[in-house]
Amino acid sequence: MDTIASLFSFITTPVSWVIVQFHSVYGALFGPDTGWAWGLSIVSLVILIRICLIPLFVKQIKATRAMQTLQPEMKKIQERYKNDKQRQSEEMMKLYKDTGTNPLSSCLPILAQSPFFFALYHVLNSIASNDTIGVINTSLLESAQKAHIVGAPLAVKFTDSSSKVEALGASLTDVRVVTAVMIVLMSASQFFTQRQLMTKNIDTTVKTPFMQQQKMLMYVFPIMFAVFGINFPVGVLVYWLTTNVWTMGQQMYVIHNNPTPGSKAQAAYLERLHKHVTQHSKVSRRRDKVIVKAIVAKGRDRNEFERKFINGLSKAGLVAQADGTVIKSDTVAAVEAEDGTPTTGMAKRQQPKRQTKAQRQSGAAKAAGESEPKTSLTKSDEPEDAKPAAAAKKGGAKPAGGTRSKAQSGQRKGPQRPKSPSKK
């Protein structure tokens, strides 16, 4: 343990100092020797660490989604070089380099808080061993040993003997009941966090080994917490339960507001966004504009939920713009080209209707007739209403060429209503 203490000495002193500062605040409210003062100090330590790790969490989300996108390419490389492991590794590294992804980025939050976890474990273990550590002096050590959380001292473990537990002023039954409940809650929170990731925030359109890996972790992590949890002091269980609850809430927020494309969470999000946009005819929040902008930029690469969202806006008389805003379609005519990119300020092109053969012939005849000189009415003493009758007497023979005969070729079959004589 001394070797471990020397390895983590650079972090145990800052961790102990932060706990003491929070203890001075909560001790004034609840009493310096109470479990509330020391327990809330540990909880506050977790919250402070997780707030500092938010940038790493954002990077983890981006790395995880990038890895999901690369899964089909990775599968192709594995199948192509399945007999050459060295070439397979080289192609994988080349793929990571070309796309700018890092598989270790998804583990950054856990790796970053691991030193704090081990430092807190060593601080609590020193309290149980009646040893001062960091800025925790003898008076603070005695205060921490008196602090109990629901009857369990901060520094005891599930596997501790009854004599050690009684020396800290507690019963073995209370300690094991409290630690067992905390271990169950810790494992359950981890399982729920992983489960909501699998059921709501995974792209269901792509079946990859990454999904199987995440599904396996959904059951492995809770079992690991249950096995190792019996060797954690109560204070460490408080730390780990708090960080699990924080992770669960943080992930729920991300799934609700920035879901993975193609997931069930994205379908629910776009449905809510569509309802809000159609009701107010605008995109209010900045993050909604960012998502709408990304959907518009995808063009033909949109998934099923994104196409449904765009079509829903069109039915409501709205058009999504390239900057993420939404306008009414009767204000600015916006159409999508064949590649799916919006083009504003253009009138929508109407496709001409397909004509029948008779209509095309009639149009050609009319065009030809307009080019010929019109026949004067004075050349014929026969009125115009008599001409159709004369043509009918000849057994339906076609009239002679001219403007009127060509114009009649496109008329409806059957008897025609005679026109009235023209007035000179």
Image (spheres, rainbow, N blue to C red):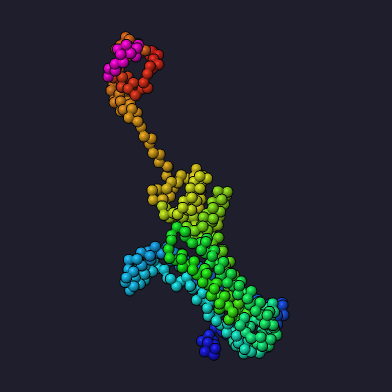
Magenta stretch contains residue 250: no
The structure residue drawn at horizontal position 62% and vertical position 84%, both measured from the top left corner, is 160
Q: Is residue 348 above or below residue 376?
A: below
Between 278 and 171, the residue placed more toward the observer is 171
Q: Position of residue 61 (x, y in %)?
A: 49, 66
Q: Is residue 352 above or below residue 27?
A: above
Read off the magenta span: 386-401
Residue 35 shown left or right of residue 287 in the figure: right
Q: Position of residue 88 (x, y in %)?
A: 34, 70
The structure residue drawn at horizontal position 54% and vertical position 62%, both measured from the top left corner, is 255
Magenta stretch contains residue 394: yes
Q: Is residue 152 above or below residue 389?
A: below
Between 241 and 290, the residue placed more toward the observer is 241
Q: How many numbered callouts?
A: 0
Q: Is residue 370 above or below residue 23?
A: above
The structure residue drawn at horizontal position 49% and vertical position 68%, both measured from the top left corner, is 216
Q: Quadrant of the C terminus?
A: top left
Between 168 and 255, the residue placed more toward the observer is 168
Quadrant of residue 421 in the image?
A: top left
Between 188 and 283, the residue placed more toward the observer is 188
Q: Position of residue 177 (x, y in %)?
A: 66, 77
Q: Is residue 86 visible?
A: yes
Q: Is residue 283 visible?
A: no
